[in-house]
Amino acid sequence: MTKVLPGQIVTYETRRESIDSVDKEKRYKQIEYILSRFPEGLTAKEISVQMKKLGYPPTDERNFSSPRLCELMKIGRVEALNEKKICEYTGKSVSVFKLISELKQMEMRDFLI
C-alpha cells in the first residue's frame, strides 16, 4: 500500500477544484479570437500576453493559454506549426500555434468576461 503524505489528498482536491473552475469553452473562444487576429500564428506566451491585454486573465502567465492550446490541438481546432521561434520573453525555442482553418471573423464582444 502506498503511503499518503501529509497534504497530498488536499493537493489533489485543490487541483481538481482549480481545473473544474475553468470555463474551457470560454477560454477556447478567447484563444481562437486572438489567433484569428494573428494568422501567422503566436506562441503560448504571446497568446497569454494578448489575453491579458484584453482583460481575460489577471496576468499574462503562459499557463492561462498552454493547457487549452493542447486541448484545442486534440480536438482539431488549433495546430502547432512545423516551425519554432525564439520567445522574446524567455529566450527559449518554442512552438508557434495557429487556427487550423480560417474561422469567420469573430467579434470581441462574444468573448468578453
Image (cartoon, rainbow, N blue to C red):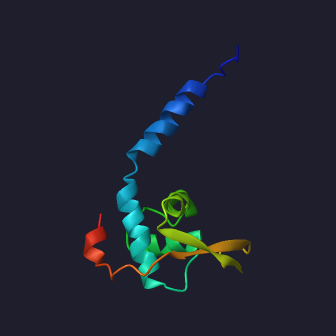
Report the quarter where the N terminus lies: top right
Q: Quadrant of residue 94?
A: bottom right
Please state if 33 lies on the left or on the right of 97 as rendered. Answer: left
Farthest residue, direction left: 109
Above or below, 104 against 111 in this view is below
Q: Nearer the viewer, residue 74 or 41?
A: 74
> Where does the image place residue 61, in percent across and percent down from the top left?
54, 63
Above or below, 58 against 22 in this view is below
Report the quarter where the C terminus lies: bottom left
Q: Quadrant of residue 91?
A: bottom right
Report the residue at 45% width, 78% height from top: 101
Above or below, 41 against 13 in this view is below
> Where does the image place residue 12, in percent across and percent down from the top left?
54, 32
Please state if 93 lies on the left or on the right of 21 as rendered. Answer: right
Farthest residue, direction top: 1
Residue 48 visible in the snapshot = no
> Where does the image place residue 71, in percent across and percent down from the top left?
51, 57
> Where does the image place residue 104, in percent across and percent down from the top left?
33, 81
Report the residue at 51% width, 69% height from top: 78
Q: Nearer the viewer, residue 73 or 54?
A: 73
Report the residue at 26% width, 71% height from top: 110
